[in-house]
């Protein structure tokens, strides 16, 4: 993680705060489903005037079917292969521009995807408590295949260490508005990204 953070620090040192001219970079948002990656990502992109891509939505557009259908037809293992392929496509196609990329909740569970994110992006973990996730996700089980069987606590336990290891910074989302979180991350990017 220290090596990743040193790389991130060097990337962020190149940012000019005075004239808002950013070095070309990609910021990825990771965290559990329900943590607000897509909503916060869109708002952050607006604040910074950067491009925004939601990886799940990108997959739907490229594959021509929704995520639950892909899971039902191919299962999680093949979905993760499809997801990794599209992740690499996005990273390669936006290598020359500033981008906010919201990842899927399980993207970083695949080693190859984890390595691609760590090597090519500034990764931020949107940390949300189990209680808040349960509140936000109640009634959305049909839209999210990984929630079958009410597995929120299990998934959080399995994934939290991966999120924390890959991300160079963690932002708590409980009790904070989308605008407040987006502005905090924007401030990290343009000033002191590795502090507090």
Image (cartoon, helix red, strand yellow):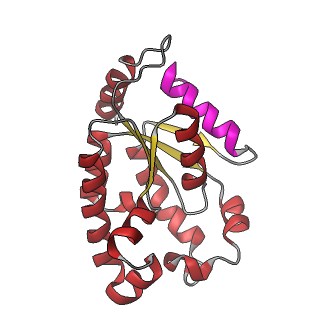
> Front-most of 154 and 186?
186
Q: Quadrant of residue 99?
A: top left
Q: Residue furthest bottom?
A: 73
Identified at 60% across, 43% down, the residue is 43
Identified at 55% across, 53% down, the residue is 37
Residue 51's place in the image compared with 162, above or below, is above
Identified at 53% across, 70% down, the residue is 154
Identified at 38% across, 60% down, the residue is 107
The percent position of residue 70, horizontal first and vertical second, equals 38, 81
Q: Is residue 162 magenta?
A: no
Q: Which residues are magenta?
A: 178-196
The percent position of residue 91, horizontal first and vertical second, equals 28, 48
Report the quarter where the N terminus lies: top left
The percent position of residue 26, horizontal first and vertical second, equals 37, 39
Residue 29's place in the image compared with 87, above or below, is above
Is any atom of residue 192 visible in this view?
A: no
């Amino acid at each position: 993680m220290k090596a990743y953070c040193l790389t991130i620090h060097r990337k962020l040192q190149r940012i000019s705060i005075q004239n808002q001219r950013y070095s070309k970079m990609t910021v990825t948002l990771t965290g559990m489903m329900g943590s607000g990656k897509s909503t916060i990502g869109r708002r952050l992109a607006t604040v910074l005037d950067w491009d925004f891509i939601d990886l799940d939505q990108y997959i739907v557009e490229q594959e021509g079917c929704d995520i639950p259908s892909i899971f039902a037809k191919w299962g999680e293992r093949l979905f993760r292969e499809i997801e990794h392929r599209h992740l690499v496509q996005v990273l390669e196609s936006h290598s020359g521009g500033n981008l906010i990329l919201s990842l899927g909740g399980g993207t970083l569970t695949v080693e190859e995807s984890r390595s691609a994110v760590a090597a090519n992006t500034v990764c931020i973990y949107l940390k949300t408590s189990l209680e808040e996730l349960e509140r936000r996700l109640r009634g959305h089980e049909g839209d999210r295949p990984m929630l079958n069987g009410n597995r929120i606590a299990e998934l959080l336990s399995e994934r939290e260490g991966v999120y924390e290891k890959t991300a160079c910074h963690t932002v708590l989302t409980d009790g904070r508005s989308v605008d407040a979180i987006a502005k905090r991350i924007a401030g990290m990017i343009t000033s002191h990204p590795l502090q507090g």
